[in-house]
Image: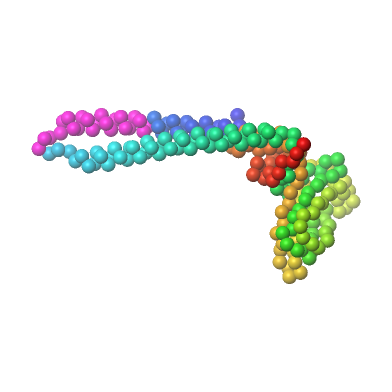
């Protein structure tokens, strides 16, 4: 069973237990209150303010549990809507905010956008262990650019297929860093519904829906 399913089941069980305990305590309190009122000393009546305060507290707790139930329902509906949207992306190409791309068939591709003019642009490709396997420089400038790596390492060897990270270091002459956004273009070939929030699956792995920047026309 997926971890998310176990978590949801545990949360539901805890909520049900809380409601059951509250109901039992509330009913017990009413029985005791009734008994006390029936057997109170007429010359020294019980303080009704204390009972009123306790009734108000029970009512507030009950209202909070009902509010939590409604929130859980809304969250469930939101997840269902997200899952439906994700399923609609199957087979479509998407532009995704990510610095990870898969090397396959001798190519790994990224685009990166320089938020301001950069006098120096250094590009590094790193493997899953964070080691730099290839590096190069790009021309100064600004705006969006494409970068494709053919899998050849700095040592002249052919890197194994897999997921690689692009690191862009863009700076001005003063040394100030230039903000850079890195994206990839991939086909969505699956949807993971086991997580708390649905994810789309591409050749490079699972992607959050929030990382999708555009779904391209067929």
- x, y percentage for residue 10? 51, 33
Residue lying farthest to the right in this orientation:
156
Q: Is residue 110 left or right of residue 179?
A: right
| Residue 163 visible in the snapshot | no
Viewer-closest of 19 and 1: 19
Tell me: 43 left or right of 94.
left
The front one of 164 and 109 is 109
Magenta segment? 21-43
Which quadrant of the figure has residue 117?
Answer: bottom right
Is 101 placed above or below 192 here?
below
- Residue 95 is left or right of residue 8, and the answer is right
Q: Please identify the dominant SS of the magenta region.
A: helix
Residue at (34% x, 29% y) in the render:
24
Which corner quadrant holds the N terminus?
top right
Could you say where residue 90 lies in the image, as x and y percent from the top left? 72, 33
Residue reaching furthest bottom? 174
Colour mode? rainbow
Pick the residue in front: 26 or 141.
141
Q: Is residue 24 magenta?
A: yes
Instruction: Indicate the position of residue 202 as horizontal and vertical percent values.
Output: 74, 38
Q: Estimate the x, y position of residue 173 in percent, counting from the top left.
A: 76, 69
């Amino acid at each position: 069973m997926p971890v998310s399913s176990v978590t949801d089941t545990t949360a539901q069980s805890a909520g049900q237990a809380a409601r059951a305990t509250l109901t039992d305590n509330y009913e017990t309190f009413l029985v005791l209150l009734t008994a006390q009122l029936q057997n109170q000393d007429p010359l020294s009546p019980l303080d009704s303010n204390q009972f009123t305060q306790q009734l108000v507290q029970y009512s507030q707790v009950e209202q909070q549990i009902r509010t939590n139930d409604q929130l859980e329902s809304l969250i469930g509906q939101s997840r269902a809507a997200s899952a439906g949207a994700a399923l609609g992306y199957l087979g479509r190409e998407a532009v995704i905010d990510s610095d990870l791309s898969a090397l396959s068939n001798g190519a790994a591709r990224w685009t990166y956008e320089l938020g301001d003019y950069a006098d120096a642009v250094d590009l590094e490709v790193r493997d899953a262990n964070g080691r730099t396997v290839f590096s190069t420089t790009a021309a100064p400038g600004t705006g969006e650019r494409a970068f494709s790596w053919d899998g050849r390492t700095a040592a002249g060897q052919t890197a194994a297929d897999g997921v690689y990270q692009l690191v862009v270091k863009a700076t001005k002459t003063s040394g100030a860093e230039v903000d850079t956004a890195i994206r990839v273009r991939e086909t969505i070939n699956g949807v993971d519904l086991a997580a708390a929030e649905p994810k789309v699956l591409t050749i490079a792995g699972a992607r959050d829906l929030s990382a999708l920047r555009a779904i391209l026309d067929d």
